[in-house]
Structures are given as C-alpha cells and as structure tokens.
Image (cartoon, grey):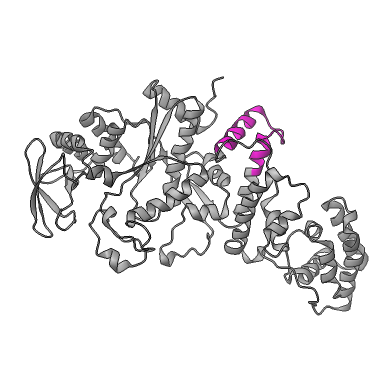
Amino acid sequence: MKRKSIHWADEYAARIIQEKGEKERYTCASGITPSGTVHVGNFREIISVDLVVRALRDAGKAVRFIYSWDDYDVFRKVPANMPQQETLQRYLRFPITDVPDPWGCDENYARHHERAIETLLPLVGIVPEYLYQAQRYRCALYAQGIRQALEKKDTLREILDAFRDEEHKIQGDYWPISVFCTACYHDGTTIESWDGQWAVSYRCSDCGHYETVDLRTTAAVKLLWRVDWPMRWAYEKVDFEPAGKDHHSPGGSFDTARRIAQAVYDYAAPVSFRYDFIGIKGSPGKMSSSTGKVVDLQDLLNVYTPELVRFLFAGTRPNTEFTLSFDLDVLKIYEDYDRTERIAWKLEPVSEELYQKERRIYELSQVEAAPHTMPYQIPFRHLCNLIQIADGDWEKALAGLADLKPSQVQALRARCRCAAYWIEQCAPEEFRFQLKNAGEQLELREEERQAIQALRDQVVARIEQYPDDQSCAAAIYALAKSCGIDDKSLFRLCYQVLIGKDQGPRLAPFLRSINKNRLLTILAAY
C-alpha cells in the first residue's frame, strides 16, 4: 500500500523521487565545519535530513545518508567556551584538523568535536556515513574537481559576481582554490600560476615559501567553499541537502552553488529546503553566557528522552522558527508527546485525519521501530513530584508503581533520569521541594495545630479509602469548612508543615502519592 504524504518529511521524499526520478539509491547529505561545539542549530539540519531519509526508506527506497565533516576548513576564530585560549590562538589560519585538542583526549581539535556528536547521534537513532574532508582532500580525491574549477574559473567569477554590486565584485585575479603552505601550514598564500593541467604554483605571504604542487598528489590544495559545496554534490551524486535560511537567501550560497553545479560540473542541484533558527528558553544545566556555552545535543538529552528530542523536530516543519525550552514549558512538551502517543495507540479518539498525522509524527519520533506494547504513561509533572517525594531516589519512586510492567521499565527509567536532572538543574525554585523529616515541628497557633491534627486523623489516617484525587480533595475542603478555616489558608498550612513552603503540588494527589506511614510520622509532631 502506497504511503500518503501526511508529514513534511514524506512530502520531501515524494518530491525527491519525482525530481530525481527512479534510482537504485538516493543520496541525502548534511555536514558542518567542526570549528566548535556542534549545537542544536546544527542538529536541526542533521535530524531534518534523517527524517527525510526515513521517509524515503519507508517508501521502499534505498538511501545513502552522508554527513561531511569539513575539517579541512581554516581555523578562523577561537570560540569563547574553549579551554587553553592562548594555545589555540597560535593555530589560527591552520586547517582545523591540524589544531591540537585542548582537552588532550583526541587526535586533534576537529576530531574532539566530531567524536562528541558521533557518540550521541546513535542515541537518537541517527547513524549516517561520515565523510572526513581533510582526509579526502589530502589524498587528492578531488583533483579532477579542482581542475574543472580552474578550467572554468572565468565562469565561476561571473556566477559569483552576478549577485554582487560593483563595490563587492571580485577584484584582480580570481582563483577558486586556496593552498595551505606546506612549510608553515597557514592559508596566507597567493596563487602564482597554473599550467592549464595539474601544476599549481603558490607563494606564502607569511613565511615566503614558494612551491609548485601537482593536484593529483598534493595534500595542500582545496576549493573555496562556494565551489567546494557544488563540486561535492556532483562527486557524491547528492539528491537532497537542506540549508539554513542564511544560505537560502536570494543570491546566497545555495543560489550560487546551484548555478555552479550545473555550469561547471554538469550536475543538477539537489532538492533542498530552508530550515529556520532555533531559540532557547530557560537554562539547561549550568549554562553561562560569560563562558560562551552553547546548547548542544547533550543538553537536550539531559532533559528530554531520545524520543522527545526527535518529537521536537518531527512535530515542527523545518522552515518554522521555534524555541527549545528548559523551563516549565518542559512539562507541556512531555504532555504533548504523551497525547500524540495515546492518539497513535488509539487510546484517545480523534478524527481519522488527525490520527494519521499524529501517528506519523509518533513513528518518526521513535529511535527505532515503534514499541510493540503501549509504554507506561505518567505525566512528567507527577513523575517529578514522585521523585522528590522519594528524596531523589527514582528507583524507589518506580517501585511504588504497582501497575508497571517489566517491558515498560526501561523507557520509564529514561524519563526518570531526565526528570531528576530537570528538577536539579533547570526547574524553578518554587517547583522544587523536600519532605520534612520526622520530628520537625513548626510553631503553630492553636487553631492551626487543630486543623493539622484533623487533617492527620480524618483524612490521612484513612487516605486509602479515597478511590481518586477528587474524593480526597472533597474531604479536604469539607475539613477546612468544619475547622472554620478558609481553603487557601489550610493549603498553605499543609505545605508549610510538609515541605516548608507556602505552595506545592496539588494537595490531594500529593497526599495520595506519599507513603501513608511517612505522612503520619511527619504529622505526628502535631
């Protein structure tokens, strides 16, 4: 049965098939320069490609998903969040792959950032084929593509100048290549000549070194980025690659790359779309603008389970700007996912159209295939309360869920880890609490003490008799009336006695979630 285009990823998969025709295998591409931490803006491109890859595979197509590390780019600036700033400054204008790892744990600076994201991507179900451009350039893999660019350098100049005003047009000689000096490794070189075939001569303005190199064997020459991109489209036969809205602006790098691909490499540009920027709301962990810390995939995985991370992007069209939240909005995002899950499992009745939409978002949100049994659902807010009631011991909190099946434990543990982290690192202070220890006693007026005693003896002592939160809440309201105290004052008093705050979780479900004996022990002081 042919899959309907019910999700934006399915729509683009259908478009790729239509525009590129039937192929034995389609190639989808993404990539970045590992000049610093790979942040969530970069991740948006990666997961957007992964969603389209999945849609193509679901349509029965073979797909190659390549991810290029542009680690032969120039190291132009030291990010503020990097250690050993002075040491890194000495490597400016070097290839990124030749910059040492300031942490001292990887082969080089580029590899450190590459490994960081390569380790995390499988956790969210993304396993591309990695291409390391320094390695590929240094073994002269692109010699023919470089020569084609040199042969068409006048055409390239025309294409690039077509989008520039007179003031910004290319001045003087134009060469579509750069050379890293083999003596000092800097890119401050000037092309002296090209013999029309494979020999390129250059002079280094930093150290004065002069050399003639052979494109077929040299490790020093690379294409300028606006030419490198379309060359690699043609070399890898890329059928799909998105780009940020800055690249997709009129006259931007995608426009020029499309023209260069056709005019220089006789290749039609891949299907593409523009993805928008991502805003950040709240603070993930110990985020600090003074240290230049950016929000990365690990920050997301600290707060959101892998399925939730995928859901954030699968449920939003890529050309829509949206905000990643680490504050109280996290509670709502988990609620939204849980509703999508209930709809997908037909546990919440909706129209057929909405069911198909939500079911597809749910499928694409899974790290692997959708689970065979319905996962255990517990609202994130309630789970946070249970963990705090259990003094942060979420295994103890799970032990209190009598209806939890063994097949559901692993997924729920993952949610517990996120909840525990969020409480500790991100939740606002008013959301956090800790139960009082037995024997701790507040100074209360006599009427307040009597109200607490009545709560203990008339509600808590028989709390198991209330079948639900509503009946328990009704008993609390009735108690307040019988004690001659208004509802809000009683609630405030209860929270002060139990957690030392003026407010807390909804009182009835809160009391029903705490072990009865523990409650009675706390209240026994009154």
First to last magenta residue range: 338-364
Toward the viewer: 75 or 117? 117
Question: Residue 5: x, y in percent?
Answer: 52, 26
Taking 332 as reference, is 315 left or right?
A: left
Number of numbered markers: 0
Question: Residue 184: x, y in percent?
Answer: 16, 58
Residue 350 among magenta residues = yes
Question: Residue 416: x, y in percent?
Answer: 64, 54
Residue at point 72%, 70% (across, down): 501
Question: Residue 453: x, y in percent?
Answer: 89, 70
Residue at point 59%, 59% (across, down): 421
Toward the viewer: 73 or 290? 73
Residue at point 23%, 56% (across, down): 94
Q: What type of secondary structure mainly makes up the magenta span?
A: helix
Q: Is residue 148 visible?
A: yes
Quarter holding the N terminus is top right
Residue 140, quarter of picture: top left
